Image (tube, grey):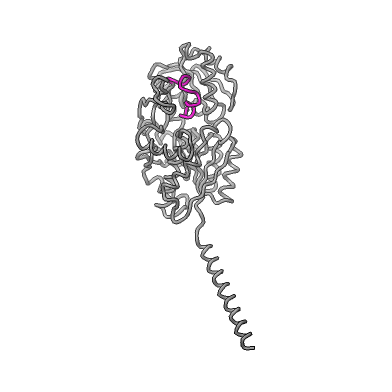
Amino acid sequence: MKTTNIARLGGLIAAAVGLTTAGLMAIAQAQTPGPLKIAVMDGFSGVYGDLTTGEVEAMQLAIEDVGGKVLGRSVEILSADHQTKPDVGAAIARKWFDVDGVKMITGLGTSSVALAVRKVAQEKGQIDINTGAASSDLTGPACSETGAHWVYDTYALAHVTGGAMVKAGGDSWYFLTADYAFGHALERDVSEVVKDSGGKVLGAVRHPLSTQDFSSFLLQAQSSKAKVIGLANAGQDTINAIKQAGEFGIVKGGQKLAGLLVFATDVQSLTLPVAQGLVLTESFYWDLNDETRAWTKRYRAKKDKLPSMLTAGVYSSTLHYLKAVQAAGTDEPKAVMAKMREMPVNDVMTKNGKLREDGRLVRDMYLFQVKSPAESKSKDDIYTLVATVPGDQAYRPMKDGKCPLIK
């Protein structure tokens, strides 16, 4: 009888200890913060699919460079394709913020999508760091206390590429413009540069996104007799326009093409015989220096593809965000953004960059010319550096942007 009671008592004690241990573990788990969730959303398919490949891998490099953790928390990446549709992008952002606990979204190529996601991020008080869209309205009327514009914008593209073309004698322009927010903003900003420099804009024609046949648009541009045909488009649209312009003999006929948003990956798709001589603006090139070459080697170990300024921009924005979270001691959006503005941006892409109150990252931009096949030493040797343009010259002065945050 006694033995039975003792055994029963021992069982009760063991059960109590087990329950206590389980309870303590549950409390510990509840008190331990989960992973810091960050996300990249872009047009991973369609007209911009080739440009955005590798952005997840670029984020992984940034996480590695902070030691894999921030504030003792692991960092988790979510990714999604917005299909270049503003409603799809906004819906994804809303779910990420409301359901999945995402604290920062980067990428966001396609200006119409970027502007839609910006509204959601503002509503939720969360961080969006745009690396892919170009509309300068993101730091103008659509600026945000928790938003940033990281890599380039239509103002910088206009002033670096457009300004160089006008100085070189291209004082009459005709535009082939993608018919959505990005194309309209780029045409507007370049037109202002041309006119302010004493040139003329002879006209423009708008084309739908993902156009396959540019023949009618190119014939209108050719018949305008403009010295420069400005391509206010990007991705596969730019590639198709340049290829078909070659078939029409436009450059051989004396007109010049201005690629207003061209990427290294575009040039490789076009090949040097087709793209040679093209003048363009970028914020990153793999072969600028030893640091860019070393980073590119690391990147290509994850994704065997030449990095563009988009992939480098995702790395740069993610790295600075993670450093700011660490420095702020919290992932609270406004505190993190304050640290992002306080800390200079220094990485493989940017040296002593400054994130302004309107969300514009001010950093150097580069004017390149595409090499001829005879000048190139390898398949990745595609650019000659023409000029380095300081950020305070490349980007719109904050007072002129009409950002409501700026008094």
Can the viewer see residue 294 in this picture?
yes
Q: Position of residue 389 (x, y in %)?
A: 36, 30
Between 140 and 228, the residue placed more toward the observer is: 228
The count of marks equals 0
Q: Which residues are magenta?
A: 261-277
Magenta span contains residue 270: yes
Q: Position of residue 87 (x, y in %)?
A: 61, 39
x 63%, y 85%: residue: 4
Can the viewer see residue 395 in this picture?
no
Q: Position of residue 183 (x, y in %)?
A: 52, 27
The part of the image, by quadrant, that contains residue 398 is: top left
Magenta span contains residue 264: yes
Left/right of residue 28 with respect to residue 382 in the rendered view = right
Check the image and name the residue furthest to the front: 3
Q: Quadrant of the C terminus?
A: top left
Q: Is residue 299 above or below residue 125?
A: above
The part of the image, by quadrant, that contains residue 362 is: top left
